[in-house]
Image: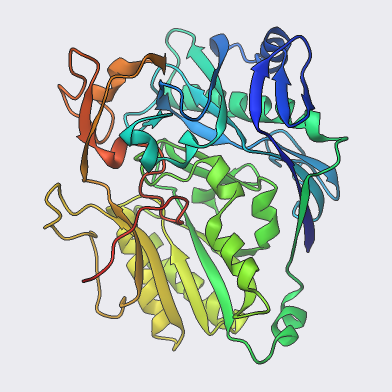
Amino acid sequence: MRLEIGNILIKDIQFADTTKVEKSVLYINKDEMIRTINTDDKIASVDLDIAKPGESIRITPVKDVIEPRVKISGNGGIFPGFLSKVDQVGEGRTHVLKGAAVVTTGKIVGFQEGIIDMTGPGADYTPFSKTLNLVVIAEPVEGLLQHEHEEAVRLLGYRAAAYLAETARNLEADEVQVYETKPLLEQAAEYPELPKVAYVYMLQTQGLLHDTYVYGVDAKKIIPTFIYPTEVMDGAIVSGNCVSACDKNPTYVHMNNPIIHDLYERHGKDYNFLGCIITNENVYLADKERHSNMTAKLVEWLGAEAVIISEEGFGNPDADLIMNCKKIEKKGIKTVIVTDEYAGQDGASQSLADADPIANACVTGGNANQTIVLPKLDRVIGHVDFVNTIAGGHDGSLLADGTIEGEIQFITGATSEVGYNKLTARTK
């Protein structure tokens, strides 16, 4: 599969009379956009706001972050299974409003939601303090169940991203990047002198409000399978979960997964990147055993000589991570695991809920229990009172003067387990 990504570089966002991109500025007709995207009777009200890097703005509770993308050619459309038919995506040409993002917020769905600060010390821990954010504020109707609330806001975010992305359909891209993965036998033979590397992509699927979707299907219902890396760039995998904000993969991060991008960058130079195996994170032991067995079998069948494994979340999924690692290593295939740590505020506790000596190559996104003080900012988009109850906060996190005390666990993307941030740790 060969996919061209055409980036339209966005350097500013403004409300205006017409929705368009002109001279790297994204102009948005606010009233028209609200009318277009607000089509669900589960949502009582929708409002839009803008948050730019460096502004004294706090967005909370953050539900999802989505990058506006539109299919220009090739099969299907963005977000297959939701906004588009379930045609296979990942080929042709896709245009991206690079530098812009849709952020969804509103009344809290689940306690594991996040904070994005556009300035101050918190901004250093989230990649989305660097994006130009169109914030969609969605308030649900009374009496809505949690899973209905989550679904309504998730789909609203996709519609918002699609609305903005239409401005890029007929534009000339500022830059074009090409990604290609060939059918397996052809791919494996292309660079016989280079080590063959695969990526095991673990998806959060631990239960209600801990969901990830693949072509519109809840990934709890899948078995481990292959996916072309370019399919991910077209929105084949999307977030529907409310796990801790620090290591949740928002939809934006799936579409820009840096492990995939880095492997493509080194493909044909240092590695032969064979592609991705997606698997889920199970609750029951029998499911963990079954799916880790299948994942190891698929890695072996690919003929991979080395594998990168990333997880999403912590605690229970650590068992899936270590099972995958052990079973792949025992087939003689080298592994590197990518995770984060919950080592206590002093850093002295066991970092993962499971471990094994065979898992001896690890990249960490940092310690989510690290404490931080966020100063009062001039403006809040959303509902700041929820910081007392979100994961990483506590009763009393929000002080009377607007200061917030807690763990970086409540900052969106702070300890990204696919490396979509700059925090890590090293062994001395």
Q: Quadrant of the C terminus?
A: bottom left
Which residue of the protein is positioned furthest toward the bottom in this rendering?
193
The residue lying toward the viewer, choosing from 305 and 324, is: 305
Residue 249, compared with residue 230, is above or below; it is above
Query: In this image, 42 relative to 161: left or right?
Result: left
Q: How many labels does the image show?
A: 0
Q: In the rendered view, does 78 fall on the left or right side of 73?
A: left
Q: Is residue 223 visible?
A: no
On the rendered structure, is 172 left or right of 231? Answer: right
**Residue 427 at x, y percent in the picture:** 24, 70
Image quadrant assignment for residue 425: bottom left
Picture residue at 65% right of the left edge, 18% below the top:
14
Can the viewer see residue 199?
A: yes
Q: Where is residue 281 in the image (x, y as percent from the top left)?
A: 41, 55
Query: Residue visible at 45% across and 15% down?
Result: 144
Above or below for 107 versus 353: above
The image quarter containing residue 331 is: bottom left
Q: How is the image coloured?
A: rainbow
Estimate the x, y position of residue 270 in percent, counting from the top left.
59, 80
The N terminus lies in which quarter of the figure? bottom right
- Closer to the camera, 88 or 194? 194
Seen at 62% across and 87% down, the residue is 194
